[in-house]
Image (cartoon, helix red, strand yellow):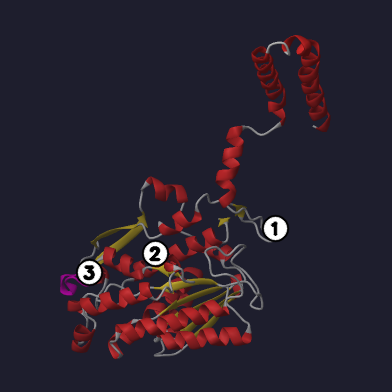
């Protein structure tokens, strides 16, 4: 290749200097003719040198793709993936469509009970969504993605059900049934190690925002961070405190605590694989588990129907946005929008107006998986 470049440069010099040397004296008598000849010679040189320099199209393409990050991970078998616009794909993760239909065995005694309906979800068929190539991960894919990771889910009952969805995917059905009684032990934490994938999973009962702040403070003090951290809180505060502005203030304290604990910038995109050592100084992948859409008429106590009405829920949702805890508003957490998923699944996906069917949390789980793939530049 180097010899070819030398030959090209030599040919260019011949084209440039020999004609100028031969015709320079004559052309110098006519300035217009001189500049015309110089232009012709310049174009000739350009033609000779073109094969040895990138084309304009290649240059534009290289500039366009410069915002994409390519990471080669030699420690696993994942394919390298280049996402042209990662933030756009992340914004489309919740473009989910639902199909809710009566079960083949419809029990009229249950009436509109959610057990009488089958729920199916998929990503929208919009072209922009198709380009992102979102995928429902199978068990083996999850084993690859989370292999050797420490995952922590902290929050209230919504977080507990989310944890169950993850366990249902990585464990066999018999083992899932065996752990349910421990996972759903009232107001308690839960810990499990999935040996097949060396996955450490913790559920932390933390129903109030200040509980989450205390947890973040412990991380910072011990310099130990999970690889994936899912947090969410709001329902208990709404029911037992019912003060949206206080909730917003607590979220800002949580945001400041989490931001200060991060070993690296909280901006979008943790380069590298999901897996990491618990003693690593890499920033954890942070997710905020949003509150579900509350169906007031279905709430099972009068206190809940009074305190957790549509107006109050709207105020709490606004405080989440104002607190800047979410990444889309400059914060550290990527939103897992249970609110939109539960709203679109609808009334036939819940029995108490607050806790939804497993399909809703399963969909949110796969949204998180795809967000992790995007953040870590992987494709299974």
Region rendered in magenta: 107-113
| Mark 3 and mark 2 residues within 8 Å of each other at the beta carbon | no
Q: Earlier in the sequence, mark 1 or mark 2?
A: 1
Cα separation between marks 3 and 2 = 17 Å
Name the residue at 36% across, 48% down.
Answer: 125
Whether residue 124 appears in magenta in the rendering, the answer is: no
Q: Looking at the image, which is closer to me, 162 or 227?
A: 227
Residue with the mark numbered 1? 74
Q: Looking at the image, which is closer to me, 209 or 351?
A: 209
Kindly identify which numbered label has been placed on residue 347: 3
| Mark 3 and mark 1 residues within 8 Å of each other at the beta carbon | no
Counting labels gives 3
Quarter of the image that includes the C terminus: bottom right
Cα separation between marks 1 and 2 = 30 Å
- Under tag 1, what secondary structure? loop
Residue with the mark numbered 2? 363
């Amino acid at each position: 290749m180097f010899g070819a470049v030398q030959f090209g440069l030599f040919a260019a010099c011949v084209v440039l200097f020999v004609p100028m040397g031969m015709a320079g004296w004559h052309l110098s008598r006519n300035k217009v003719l001189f500049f015309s000849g110089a232009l012709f010679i310049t174009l000739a040189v350009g033609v000779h040198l073109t094969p040895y320099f990138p084309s304009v199209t290649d240059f534009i393409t290289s500039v366009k793709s410069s915002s994409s990050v390519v990471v080669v991970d030699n420690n696993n078998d994942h394919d390298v993936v280049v996402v042209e616009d990662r933030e756009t794909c992340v914004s489309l993760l919740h473009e989910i469509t639902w199909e809710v239909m009566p079960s083949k065995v419809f029990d009229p005694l249950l009436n509109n009970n959610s057990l009488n309906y089958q729920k199916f979800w998929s990503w929208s068929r919009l072209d922009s969504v198709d380009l992102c190539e979102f995928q429902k991960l199978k068990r083996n894919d999850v084993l690859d993605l989370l292999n050797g990771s420490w995952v922590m889910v902290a929050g209230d009952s919504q977080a507990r059900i989310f944890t169950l969805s993850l366990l249902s995917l990585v464990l066999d059905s018999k083992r899932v049934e065996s752990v349910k009684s421990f996972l759903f032990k009232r107001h308690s934490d839960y810990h499990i190690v999935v040996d097949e994938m060396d996955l450490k999973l913790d559920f932390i009962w933390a129903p109030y925002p200040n509980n989450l702040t205390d947890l973040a403070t412990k991380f910072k003090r011990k310099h130990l961070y999970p690889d994936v951290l899912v947090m969410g809180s709001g329902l208990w505060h709404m029911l037992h405190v019912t003060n949206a502005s206080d909730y917003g203030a607590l979220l800002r304290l949580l945001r400041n605590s989490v931001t200060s604990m991060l070993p690296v910038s909280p901006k979008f995109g943790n380069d590298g694989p999901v897996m990491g050592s618990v003693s690593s100084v890499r920033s954890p992948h942070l997710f905020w588990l949003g509150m579900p859409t509350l169906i007031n008429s279905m709430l099972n106590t009068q206190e809940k129907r009074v305190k957790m009405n549509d107006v109050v829920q709207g105020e709490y949702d606004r405080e989440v946005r104002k607190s800047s805890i979410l990444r889309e508003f400059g914060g550290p957490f990527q939103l897992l929008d249970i609110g939109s998923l539960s709203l679109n699944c609808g009334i036939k996906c819940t029995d108490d107006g607050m806790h939804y069917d497993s399909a809703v949390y399963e969909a949110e789980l796969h949204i998180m998986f795809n967000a992790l793939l995007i953040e870590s530049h992987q494709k299974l």
